[in-house]
Amino acid sequence: MSRSLILIRHAETVANAERRWQGSLDSQLSDTGTDQLARLRRRFGGTAPARLIASDKQRTLATAEAIGAPTPDPRWREFDVGAWEGLTTEEVQERYPGEMEALIAGEDVSLGGGEQMSDFHARIAEAFDDAFDDMDDGDETVVVTHGGVIWSVMNRVLGREGTGVPAIPAHNTSITRVRALADGSLQLSVFNDATHLTHVPVQFGPDGTVVTLIRHGRTIGNMTDRWQGRSDSPLTDEGRATAAAAARHAASFDALYTSPLGRAAETADILAAANGHPEPVTHEGIIEMSFGMWEDLTSEEARAQDPDLFDTIYRQERDEPRGRTGESFTQAGERMRGAIAELAASEHRNIGAVSHGAAIRSYTISVLGLGFEQRNRIPIPRNTSMSRIVYADRPILASYNVAPHLD
């Protein structure tokens, strides 16, 4: 069993729309923000969360009240940015040179003479721990908070304290889910799900080519927990149905690519038919990780076939090629990184790529600057889930494992 914390960023404010830093300053919701509340309410289906906490700021309380009766907790407030309050990013960079760069680098700064970042992270860590301590196995708590708070939580869950997470700020009213697993470890299971919105402006973040990585639909091999790798297995009826359902939440792609494996190609065909996307183009670089001699085996069968290698990889945490003749996790991530960079360098600005669970996770771990031993800080993405990368001068995570049609 696990416990889950759902983090929701408040609806858009006038200051957000004007791209101004708020911090402890409050600002009324914009017209877009009011519309976002209605969409968030529909997303929850009129059912109030059993446990609902909110920062005590006006913008977070108004957002939380759209889905239930929140308990205010000032520990979930945004960090205080001191003299930055009310300024645009351009004004901040002009008046306080170097501070923005220090923030992005994860340094322990006091922005505009406001809250020390180490104090902010400690405040959020205390609220975070208390929220999980108050839950039993299987429980879920919803917290309506701020973009900087979600960033702080991600730093902790991903083990990136002091370095900063290469991810865009969470969208207004987006949903991010953190799980505490049975062994006590933390996992960022969903990041930045804003599929209930029709428009998702980013107040602070890079502009670039967007690549949406889509995992194929469920296969017969998935049903029996087999490591499919380069072997193939047909989609189940459920897999085809969820691929069609995913199409309702997919962007309108300028180009759609697919792994050469049948399960990915069929998923891409379903997406293209449902949304009128361009005909899928096969790209060898986004194929699944190779499991070598472990192809099409279950975990227990792989362990029985080569117990020493299995122990080396999964107990000693040494990233060796799977099944002796396959790829390592790191090799798969590097291959995917080269392939996605190639796609992002094309003239297209919005690209879809249908790939596989291990391939997408290994690539995302690489983008986040993590290693093999940290892979379980994010899960293998669900079948037909979508994960987005913004590719400017480097890849930045925009969302992960988003699948509202499965929730």
Image (cartoon, rainbow, N blue to C red):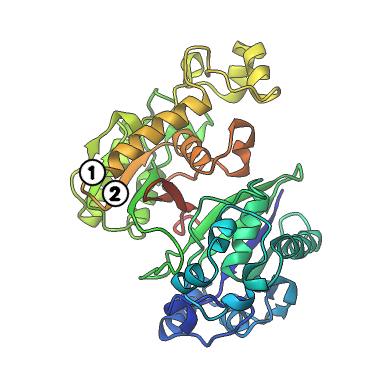
Q: Position of residue 320 (x, y in %)?
A: 57, 18
- Identified by mark 1, the residue type is Ser
Badge 1: residue crowd in 10 Å (few <14, some 14–19, many ≥20): few
- Confirm or deny contact between disc 1 and disc 2 (CB under 8 A): yes
- Identified by mark 2, the residue type is Ile
In front: mark 1 or mark 2? 1
User: On the image, numbered disc 1 is attached to which residue?
Assistant: 346
Considering depth in this image, is 15 or 379 the residue closer to the camera? 15
Instruction: First in sequence, mark 1 or 2: give its number.
Output: 1
**Is residue 364 in sight in this rendering?**
yes
Q: Residue at x 32, y 43 (%)?
A: 353
166, above or below 8, in the image: above
152, above or below 200, in the image: above
Q: Residue at x 66, y 25 (%)?
A: 317
Considering depth in this image, is 224 or 281 the residue closer to the camera? 281
Considering depth in this image, is 28 or 143 the residue closer to the camera? 28
356, above or below 118, in the image: above
User: On the image, numbered disc 2 is attached to which residue?
Assistant: 351
**Is residue 73 in sight in this rendering?**
no
